[in-house]
Image: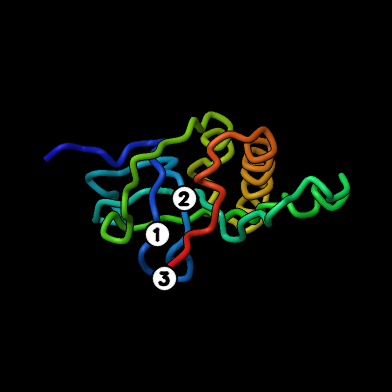
Amino acid sequence: MAKFLRGGKVVIILQGRYAGKKAVIVKHFDEGTKERPYPHAVVAGIERYPLKVTKAMTQKKVAARSHVKPFIKVVNYAHLMPTRYSLELEEIKSAVTAETFQEPTQRAVAKKAIRASLEKRYVAGKNKWFFTKLRF
């Protein structure tokens, strides 16, 4: 079977708290690990999407509505639906390490780095589909 769940692939979370949210695969484990003996991936996604912005809005209001709330999570492949889209994720990859999930403070630091990266990408106008909420 072809391996298509690779780093940078945009996926949709199907189960759990973040069901219906878009995420990008940061690290993949096709064979599993000792702690998790099933195929899984570390994903970084958007918990709260940015709001609509119009020309009439002030810069302050645009900045406030452009906020992104990220999440990072280890997800079983069975709970991921791949899309045709992909992202470049050098900045996100450097923020998420193996120790990120050990302590809540490290997780918070990683989330801040991911948030800054995603907001910068959103303001630049890249990957518009990734920053729109799924309507279903």
Would you call the spot at circle 1 few (<14 residues within 10 Å), some (14-19), or many (20 or more)? many
Label drawn at residue 123: none
Three-letter amino acid code at the position of disc 3:
Gly
Picture colour scheme: rainbow
User: Which image quadrant for residue 29?
Assistant: top left
According to the picture, the residue beneath numbered tag 2 turns out to be 23
SS at mark 3 in the image: loop
- Secondary structure under tag 1 reads strand
Q: Residues within 10 Å of mark 2 (few under 14, many from 20)?
A: many
Q: According to the image, label 1 marks what residue? A: 13
Q: Quadrant of the C terminus?
A: bottom left
Q: Nearer the viewer, residue 89 or 21?
A: 21
Comparing 70 with 63, the one in front is 63
Q: Amino acid at mark 2?
A: Ala
Q: Is residue 3 left or right of residue 70?
A: left
**Which amino acid type corresponds to the residue marked 1 in the rendered image?**
Ile
Circles 2, 3 touching at the beta carbon (< 8 Å): no
Query: Counting residues from the N terminus, which is met first, the one under dot 2 or under dot 3?
Result: 3
**How far from the left and from the top, in percent, is residue 57?**
84, 50
Q: Secondary structure at mark 2?
A: strand
Q: Give the camera-side residue of 115 and 41.
A: 115
Tag of residue 16: 3
Give percent across and percent down for residue 33: 29, 49
Which of the two discs, 2 and 1, labels the residue nearer the N terminus? 1
